[in-house]
Amino acid sequence: MPNEISVCNLSFRYQDSTPYVLKDISLTVKKGEWLTILGPNGSGKSTLAKFFNALLIPLTGEVVSCGKNTVDSAEWSSIRRDVSMVFQNPDNQLVAPTVEDDVAFGLESAGIPYDEMHQRVKDCIQRLGLEGFEKTEPHNLSGGQKQRVALAGALALKPKVIVLDEATSMLDPQGRNEVLTIVRKLNKEDGVTIIAITHDVNEAIASDRVIVLNDGSIVYEGIPRELLANREILRANNLSSPFIVDVARELRKYQILIDENVLTHEELVNAICSYKRII
Amino acid sequence: MITIFDNVIIGQYVPRESFIHRMDPRAKIIAIFIFIVFLFISRHPVVLMLAAILTGVTFLLANIPFRYYIKGMHFIAIIILLTFLLHLFMTNDGRVLLDLSWITIYSGGVIEGSLIALRLFLLVLMASLLTLSTMPMDLTDGLERLMKPLAAMGVPTHELALMMSIALRFIPTLLEETSKIINAQMARGANFSKGSLWTRLKALIPILVPLFIQSFKRAEDLATAMEARGYNGSKGRTKFRRLQWKRNDTIAIGVLLIFALITVIFRVYT
């Protein structure tokens, strides 16, 4: 599969006198995949995210997004249309006073004609289950709804990649599920490439591939199942293992042998039920 | 606390299906502008009567109950009353109506005072009509379009409109935040209602400092988010909202122009 984004030997620091935030990062994101970039606070993961859509420009190394080198300032608006971003704080990324105006904001910037804009806004609002909220002011929405509006605004630009920069970290469990369900749908049904930046290991479970970032370097790359079973790597990078994995491990201590691969709630329930039957 | 601010964006807007509500915001702004300017051009009773009729008709057309107007008028009422009294006491024209040792009231004062008070009242009523019948977003839009010609002279009309709309978006958020900070500081033992004025003013500092810091953080986040969404200034930008100038708008402006013409005629020939 072709690469949607490729990062090559990227190093970065904010000022000449400060230490490097990113150290010689190289990675590729394949078309249609769901990549999770995991890392503790201060690992440089949010900084890395800003390189994908040319919010930051590399001084050393190279970032190519959707076939366009981010050094080329003429390509920036087209890169930002292809690579949309949803940020952490739901209150600080909605620009317009009503939901539909906000979904339209990126389209207005892109110069989309009136009729098409209205069609796209309508489609995206419907797609994200926000019908009836068109004229609502953002401060009357819940956190999950606000993030869905942000996602709708990102989706309206018909991006090839959506970057979620800790987009669920400030939400309650319900809001988080709302957002993740939609992200999954966009990834599976529309083939949008997803890059999820997070410090929550649970969010990595559903993704295709995980990269762990610590102190500006990539320390692990692999599929989520292997990472979650690997306690040493998790502990070395200040990542807590998922609750379900912990439960399974504790059960194993009591000679209740549950498969190491159990990661989700459902899998655990199934494992316990089938275990009973074996007895 | 938050509930008080719940409808800031809607502002004073009273949703109704009326002739006035359906008007283009541009037409409303122009019409009110004409009305206010020409209201003060002539002081002939006929003109004032016309203005009163015009206001009355607009009021009836807008179909907004009078109590909504009163809500915002407490402060203005004081100003109107003060102006009336000033004119009453300061004018030395006409017959003496009342002669006390410390003050003399002339008939001219009563007339002058009433005229000014009536004009101010009509003006305020019309101006409230604008905000009561138009959503702030539409007002912003209307203003932006009307200022368009100024853009050629280098006035940043698009930016001004964007600022207004971002302000509309963030006023409730900031109010919510303020009440959160107040609660947080109260939980830490802050007291905002005791002590001298100076002490109470100083008590505001622990509210303002975090509020400012948070606002700057917000501004930075918002700027990044806007950039990420391809914001590029007004260049090559299309609009989600479109204003539609209808026949009714032309008629309304026409009526106001006739009013303007009559005031000028009265001004010149009497």
Image (tube, rainbow, N blue to C red):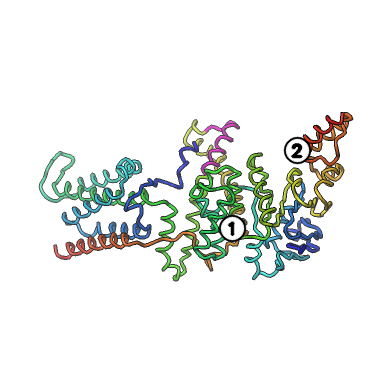
The secondary structure that most of the magenta stretch takes on is: helix
Q: CA distance from mark 1 to mark 2?
A: 34 Å
Q: Nearer the viewer, residue B242 or A235?
A: B242
Residue A244 included in the magenta stretch of the image: no
Residue B180 included in the magenta stretch of the image: yes
Report in which chain the residue with disc 1 lies. A
Mark 2: secondary structure: helix
The correct choice, above or below, for B216 with respect to B237 in the image is: above
Q: Residue at x 49, y 30 (%)?
A: B194
Residue occupied by mark 2: A266
Q: Residue at x 76, y 40 (%)?
A: A264
**View extreme (front): residue:** A277
Where is residue A258 shown, x and y percent of the image?
85, 35
Q: Amino acid at mark 1?
A: Ala
Is residue A213 visible from the viewing direction of this image? Answer: no
The answer to which of marks 1 and 2 sits earlier in the sequence is 1
Where is residue A198 shown, x and y percent of the image?
72, 48
Tag 1: Cα neighbours inside 10 Å, few (<14), some, or many (≥20)? Answer: many
**View extreme (left): residue:** B95
Mark 1: secondary structure: helix
Residue occupied by mark 1: A156
Q: Nearer the viewer, residue A58 or A241?
A: A241
Q: Nearer the viewer, residue B14 or B16?
A: B16
Report in which chain the residue with disc 2 lies. A
Which residues make up the magenta segment? B174-191
